[in-house]
Amino acid sequence: MEIERKFLVGEIPSLEGLEFDEITQAYISINPEIRVRKRGNRYYRTEKGEGAMIREENEWEITKEEYLDGVNRSEGRIIEKTRYCIPYKSHIIELDIYKGKHDGLVVCEIEFESEADAISLEIPKWFGKEITHDIEFRNKMLALK
């Protein structure tokens, strides 16, 4: 189960000294949502269920060959971004700076242990509009544009 909230970024905070990964992900299927992802030197396959803030998510590590096979089957539905991990209270904010056809889009998301934890989040001042429930900003929808 994945519990997360997602926001546009109003003002990018200082990223100096933060860990980051280059991510490329390709969508094998939009519905159901099935993607393959390269993050750094590791590869993953993820299947996500329906929903917004709370939804099923199953992810497991795969080989480079399985990843490349998924990319080949994605019909060009590829997302590229740089992800920074920003410590915030007891959470990690994942800030994504998109590249390629989505250059200029900056989004952040935070995962939670419970719905109550998600609802009680004290939102940092640099966050912009919340897009948790806006399907147009889901990566699978971005992959179609």
Image (cartoon, rainbow, N blue to C red):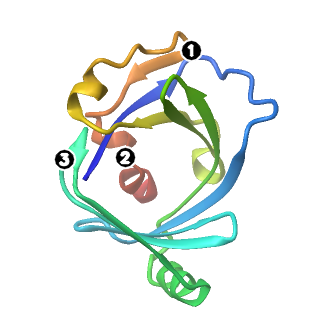
At 29% across and 35% down in the image, what residue appears? 134
Which of the 4 image quarters holds residue 7?
top left
x, y (%) of residue 120? Answer: 29, 17
Which residue was labeled with disc 1? 126
Between disc 1 and disc 2, whose residue precedes? 1
The amino acid at mark 2 is Arg
Q: CA distance from mark 3 to mark 1?
A: 26 Å
| Image: 114 above or below 69 | above
At 53% across and 64% down in the image, what residue appears? 25
Farthest residue in the right direction?
17
Q: CA distance from mark 1 to mark 2?
A: 21 Å
The amino acid at mark 1 is Trp
- Name the mark on residue 138: 2
At 23% across and 66% down in the image, what residue appears? 31
Which residue was labeled with disc 3? 51
Between disc 3 and disc 1, whose residue precedes? 3
Asked if residue 4 lies left or right of residue 53, the reply is right
91 and 80: which one is in front? 91
| Image: 89 above or below 77 | above
Q: Nearer the viewer, mark 2 or mark 3?
A: 3
| Image: 34 above or below 9 | below
